[in-house]
Image (tube, helix red, strand yellow):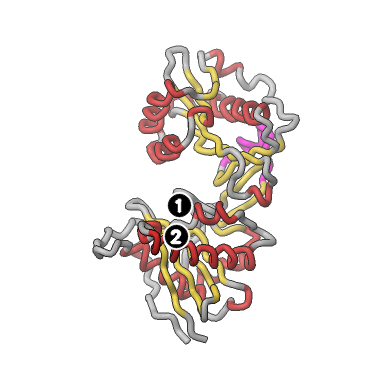
Amino acid sequence: MTWSVSSFHLLDAEDERGQAWRRELLDMGYDLWMDALGDSWPLDRDMFYRHAESGAMAMENGRALGLVLHERTPEKGAIKAIVVHPDFRRQGVGTILMRRAMRSLRWQGRQTYRVWPAPPYMLLGGGYRYIWPGIPEDLSDSKGFFDAVLGWPYSEPSYDMIMPLHDFSPPPGCYQRPAAGGITFRSATVDDMPRVLAFEEREFPGWVRYMREHAPEDIVIGVDSAGVVVASLLFDMPPILWSRLLGGGAAEIGAVGVAESRRNLGVGTALVARACQILRDRGVETAVLRWLYRVDFYRRIGFRVWKQYIMSSKTLDYVSAPYGAPRS
């Protein structure tokens, strides 16, 4: 078998010709995704496009054999997903795509051939607009592939959790301790946004970008008696990434954060409970939390584990897989 590999990046699609070429590759990539994962991890086409900012496709005679999606920032690189058509697995397609992705993450540039410094580490999964935080447990057979190709180390698992909202009630007394400290919870307003962003810059700088992308009414804040923001989270309203799995009435809660000085006072529990009440009142059927480690904390509110992931990251200095041309 002989195949070719084509890369695609948002930066390559700044004119109509580039957009058409990239769209053609993404159409092939979506069809491949659904052929390979449609039964276990189905996606809507538009959601796939939104998460496929950069990647590479292996093809033979115009047919998609495999796909890798990746993301690069100055802080880290991420292999967001790697998918090989069931008919072409164990034939070297995934290995070639993985090597292509690693090369792109090391030396991603544009037509000017500007070279970026290598990011300090890589993730399997993750990224800013991530699909999975790690390797899904129900796809754990792929762990052997990553072991063989790169020898990635594995760490503690992470989880996604869900909770039906039709009969949700806050845990008894969950607002009492924060209220004793003068803290109340509500949806943000336009006037709140400078204080919200200042809070994120101070406490969770990695989340500022997320907050800027959301409307104030999709952000819930905890505010003390002096009007200082001491906690926040945000919503992604339907449709969300996994709406095909969870139904069209599912919304995601993310970026849950409490100021360091206000932790262990019940603020986090009250913040999430208030968010669930707001979503329930909007008619949302299911609340979703993704990429979590504090499972017991969210269980107290009523969430249950939905999915589990094998987490892995590796410093770039120790990535030593050779880069080769596609083989026949």
In this figure, which residue is indicated by the disc labeled 1? 127
Residue at x 44%, y 56% (from the top left corner):
53
**Residue 321: percent from the left, percent from the top?**
40, 73
Q: Answer whether residue 13 is visible to the viewer in this image.
A: yes
Is 301 in front, or is 21? Answer: 21
Q: Is residue 93 above or below residue 254?
A: below
Residue 33 numbered tag:
none
Magenta residues span 294-305
Eyeballing the image, is 302 above or below 315? above
Is residue 303 located in the magenta-colored stretch of the structure? Answer: yes
Return the residue found at the far right.
167
Q: Which residue is mark 2?
A: 70
Residue 275 position by quadrant: top right
Q: Relative to 56, say whether 315 is above or below.
A: above
- 72 or 304: nearer the viewer: 72
In magenta segment, residue 13 = no
**Mark 2 crowdedness (10 Å alpha carbons): few <14, some 14-19, many ≥20:** many
**Horizontally, is 217 left or right of 305 in the view?**
left
Report the amino acid beneath label 1.
Gly
Q: Is residue 318 left or right of residue 304?
A: left
> Do the numbered discs 2 and 1 sit on residues whose CB atoms are within 8 Å?
yes
Amino acid of disc 2: His
Q: Is residue 136 left or right of residue 127?
A: right
- Nearer to us in this view, 259 or 236: 236
Q: Secondary structure at mark 1?
A: loop
